Amino acid sequence: MFVFGTADDVFSMAIRIEENGYAFYDGAAKKTKEAAVKRLFEELAGMEEGHIRAFKLIRSTMPAALLEPPVWDPEGLAESYLQATADTHIFTVEAAESRLKGIKTADQAIDMAIQFEKDSVAFFLGVKELLSHPDGKDEINKLIGAEMEHIRMLSRAKWLLSRTGSAGIE
């Protein structure tokens, strides 16, 4: 395939990922009994809201000409990559809620969150490659850095829980 939607479509997907991240963290915060993990999930939910605003701002400030034409992808590599990422990522609020139902411990919630963040980084790296506008790439780099910080925060929380034992989730 020679084209993969528009840059605007890609930004819509990125916003959706962040909305689903918010839904996951908000739901996990409501379920957890462990106060420290609850605060972490609440903080991450707030950060996801900030990412939603950031993606919307990037999209609104990019020149219209870069958002409208299809993204040139002569070998279909970008499409294949983003589709594979999409297939393994939580793309709906319903999927996030369904996965939350199966979580019984804080460790499980943290593991799922780490995987979600890793998938987000992979997706955003793919998005960055599709953008030709340097300002958009710089902003995507900032968001990738933020997602990587989420992974560090979650990994630290997992390590701390391993020292104190796993907390149950309702």
Image (cartoon, rainbow, N blue to C red):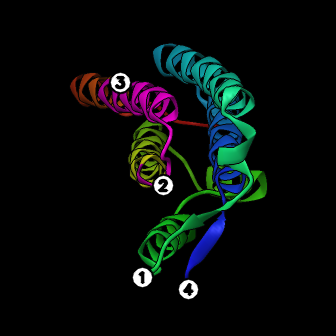
* Above/below status of 170 relative to 95: above
Residues at discs 3 and 4 in contact (Cβ within 8 Å): no
6 is within the stretch colored magenta: no
Q: Residue 1 bears which disc, if any?
A: 4
Q: Earlier in the sequence, mark 4 or mark 2?
A: 4
Amino acid type of the residue that numbered disc 2 sits on in the rendered structure: Leu
Mark 4: secondary structure: loop
Q: Earlier in the sequence, mark 3 or mark 2?
A: 2
Other residues around mark 1 within 10 Å, as few (<14) / some (14–19) / many (≥20): few
Q: What residue is disc 2 on?
A: 130
Q: Magenta residues?
A: 129-152
Task: Tell me where residue 165 appears, x and y as whole percent.
Answer: 31, 30
Q: Earlier in the sequence, mark 3 or mark 1?
A: 1
Kindly report the distance in space between the C-alpha atoms of the residues bearing marks 4 and 2: 15 Å
Q: Earlier in the sequence, mark 3 or mark 4?
A: 4
150 is within the stretch colored magenta: yes
Query: Which image quarter is the C terminus in?
Result: top right
User: Quadrant of the rendered structure where residue 22 is?
Assistant: top right
Amino acid type of the residue that numbered disc 4 sits on in the rendered structure: Met
